[in-house]
Image (cartoon, rainbow, N blue to C red):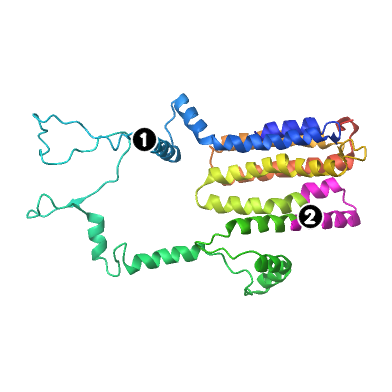
Amino acid sequence: YYITSLAVLATFVSDQVVEAWEAGVLFAMYICYVAFMFVNRPLNVWAYELTGTPLNKELREYVQEKRAASGKVEPENATEATEPDAPDAMTRPDEPPKPAKDNFMEHDKVVVKSPDEDEDHEPEDLAEKLADKIPGKEDSKGASMEDVDDDDDDDDEPDDFMERPDGTVSLIIWVLCLPVYIPIYYTLPWPRKGQKLYMVSFGLSLLWIGSFAFLLVWWTEIVAAIIGIPTIISGLTFLAAATSIPDAVSSMAVARKGQADMAVSSSVGSNIFDILVGLPVPWLIKHAIESGNNFIGVPIRSPYLMFYTCLLLGMVLGTVVSIMISGWKLSKFLGGCMAVLYIVFIVTCVLIEELQPAGLRTN
């Protein structure tokens, strides 16, 4: 879908003018993308079953939830039918029926039972028995387990970024970040467990992100004009790096938890959002404002934007090939390949803007 979005964008900017209907098509593509995400897991299950690939843990849990919601009996809940006149030699007639076995394995359980224990006595898990003998270890309802839960809750609490840090470098960075910290700290509801103001926090966060992004773009254009850097180069380097830092931080956070697929999908999803929402929505607003002034469309200043879009398609192909070579795992080799691809992209764009080759112009 990302490649399709890039191809449509390259087609629309080929004439260096973006009309209202073209911006509307891009935004409609994002709505279709969101709708597709709602049926993503059923399509995954269908594709796995079609190819005969075993379902992963997440998809197995999804299938079980769907079957339970529809009222179907799960294999693990089904019981084996026993003949009343021919009981099994290994079981007693008064015992409840055993659950039917399926392809899913249950957790191993070691049972400790004394000879004088009654038959009706419930078996005791060895792990629970050993846990009771450990000094300072209490039951799941005891104080010790509650303390552990409290510690986990404390880990989920965000750090107070208004506290003055130690160290010269950390203090300098903290002072430079105060213009961002102060409005966020005093306007956003502080996140706490059980708080119901998360939608307010989400909306205000979007408002502050939009405000800071506007100032970032505005000030970058001013600095670039003073230094003499072309706008397209400053956008490809400084602005792109600054706006991608949150994506990098979020990808690192989920990758450290072992969720590599989420790290990759987060980066791809953010780029899809930028192409199908970040670009067409301002274009649609511009058309709505200038609709009565014989406004034809939003002009594209760079004559090489078509080439840049095609180059980005090549970078996507290089990324997929690098992931395949690394065995579909996040590794140092894959990180090096990503860095090389980024350097090639930046160097190529800068050379195109400096040399201005006539053969690569759109018109």
Residue type, numbered disc 1: Gly
Residue range in magenta is 211-238
Task: Locate the N terminus and report the quarter of the image it occupies.
Answer: top right
Left or right of 266 in this view: 286: right
Question: How far apart, in angstroms, are the residues tagged by discs 1 and 2?
Answer: 52 Å
On screen, 358 above or below 286?
Answer: above
Residue 264 in the figure: left or right of residue 78: right
SS assignment for the magenta stretch, majority: helix
Image x and y of residue 169, in percent: 68, 70
Q: Nearer the viewer, residue 38 or 107?
A: 38
Q: Position of residue 158 (x, y in %)?
A: 56, 64
**Mark 1 Cα within 10 Å, few/some/many (few <14, many 20+)?**
few
The percent coordinates of residue 359 (x first, y second) are 88, 30
Q: Answer with the quarter of the image where residue 127 lies.
A: bottom left
Residue 262's x, y, as percent? 55, 45
224 in the magenta segment: yes
Residue neighbourhood size for the residue with mark 2, other residues' Cα within 10 Å, grouped as few (<14), some (14–19), many (≥20): few
88 on left or right of 203:
left
Q: Residue under circle 2?
A: 214
> Which residue in the rendered view is the most extreme toward the top?
50
Q: Which residue is mark 1?
A: 71
Helix, strand or loop for disc 1: loop
